[in-house]
Image: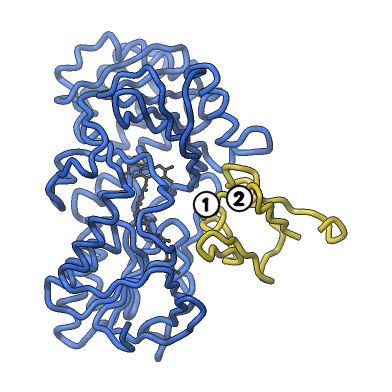
Amino acid sequence: MLKIHREICGYCGACVSVCPEGALELIDAYLTVDLKCKDCSICTRACPLGALEVVDEGQV
Amino acid sequence: MKDRYDLLIIGGGPGGAIAAKTAACKGLSVCLVEKRPAIGVPVRCAEGIGKDILQQFIEPDERWISAEIDRAILVSPDGTSMVLEPQHAGNEVGYVLDRKIFDRELVWQAAAAGADIAVKTRAVAPIMENGKVSGATIESCGEVKNVRAEAVIAADGVESKFARWCGIDTTVPLREIMSCAQYLMTNLTIDPHATVFYFGNSIAPEGYLWVFPKGERSANVGIGITGRKSAPGKRAKDYLDAFVRSHFPDGRTIECIVGGVSVCRPLPCTVADGLLIVGDAARVVDPLTGGGIFNAMYTGQLAADVAAGAIAEGNTLKERLMPYDTTWRCAKLGKNLERNYKIKEFFIGLSDKKLNALAQSVSKINLKEFSTLVLVKELIKRNPGLILDLKALKDAIS
Ligand SMILES: Cc1cc2nc3c(=O)[nH]c(=O)nc-3n(C[C@H](O)[C@H](O)[C@H](O)COP(=O)(O)OP(=O)(O)OC[C@H]3O[C@@H](n4cnc5c(N)ncnc54)[C@H](O)[C@@H]3O)c2cc1C
């Protein structure tokens, strides 16, 4: 599943624009991910800071 | 905020602000909602804009101009630099703005014209009636309410979720999102009137690094790389840090900015029943330069114009809003977007070696006769080894 490293996230929305599922949303400075996420990891690439990571369920 | 307006605008960037002002000046009841608590911050921009195009919308004011630019310098991977002087550089010569103030000024002008403004107020869903967008569900400080409108303008920037909720796919392909990082730096030794662009696969793969002056000793130092080149340890911030270490070791960073810029083609259609999409949300950023301030203002104004006419006639269905889409596509803006998309695709395919060869021959050409086509013809003459690459470019732009 997608893990958001909030201490790294710069809440810029680059990830939101590339998500094919529309699963990401920025509520001002708070990035959220919903159940539509398919762990495709495209957003983890677009992030300029490396705040997103797809991890195994157990690692969260 | 009322329950009903003629026009509802989602997003308080330059696109939304100009749309709100334009519509209010035409006597429409307008509401602009912005989810952030303040207009203009955090800045997500290098703040460069051409003088002539800016003046189409607003009288330049020193309160929001950080620097005046009279030349651009392009630096190739091997360090060859090419200077573009005003008469050749076209709209690359202009201002570096202070968007914290600039964006506010635009929204203030919209408010002065009569538009309602709501900050910390987010559109969370469209109101759909018989397939037509008829307003939006709005959340403001925890309170949720429905706001109806004859038409909605989606000016919600790179995220572009509103149009997506209305059923339009706004996804940017990974290879066409520029993943960007920028520092506002001070204590720099720079030319305060020149913008500098650095190219090369080890500096900024498939993108460029920029130094845009913000004063005598300060500048926006930033970088954009494509999403597909971005990876752990090789992200925009990693490249930027490496550049800053080698070029500005004594610089001090007073602001860290991140963002995404789309360099794809525009959405195939920027209207739907009751909906117009403008600015970054419509993917109308210049794919070659990454500039989108002017394009957002231009499309914002045009969308409000068309919406006003449609609302006066009591018909805001797609067909009646179509002139917005066809007008910007047929205008210089739409043509430039298509041409610059092709030029961008050409440059992305070039190796550092080819970039160096081109830069070296350009620096020998007398740039007084500068026009893109003349330049390309000249380059073909001087670079027989690159004839195939350059022929593709010539076809793209002629
Ligand atoms: C690093 C970087 C450098 C850039 N450099 C330049 C440059 O030098 N020159 C140039 O011309 N352009 C540049 N750009 C592009 C430029 O910043 C944009 O093109 C421009 O801001 C687009 O204006 P807009 O009004 O379409 O969107 P934005 O300015 O992004 O405004 C959209 C607004 O909508 C709000 N919003 C989003 N969703 C909702 C919602 N659901 N409800 C309410 N509000 C919402 C957002 O909070 C935001 O304030 C750069 C961009 C980046 C990231």
In percent of width and height, residue B320 lies at: 22, 78
In percent of width and height, residue B84 lies at: 24, 21
Extreme bottom residue here?
A: B130
Residue drawn at the location 32% of the way across and 37% of the way down: B396
Chain ID for blue: B
Question: Would you say B253 lies left or right of B62 here?
Answer: right
What residue did someone put label 2 on? A9
Rendered shade, chain A:
yellow
- Which of the two discs, 1 and 2, sits closer to the camera? 2
Extreme top residue here?
A: B364
Q: Quadrant of the N terminus of chain B?
A: bottom left
Disc 2 marks a residue whose amino acid type is: Cys
In percent of width and height, residue B43 lies at: 40, 48
Q: Quadrant of the C terminus of chain B?
A: top left
Quadrant position of residue B132: bottom left
- CB at disc 1 and ligand 1 closer than 8 Å: yes
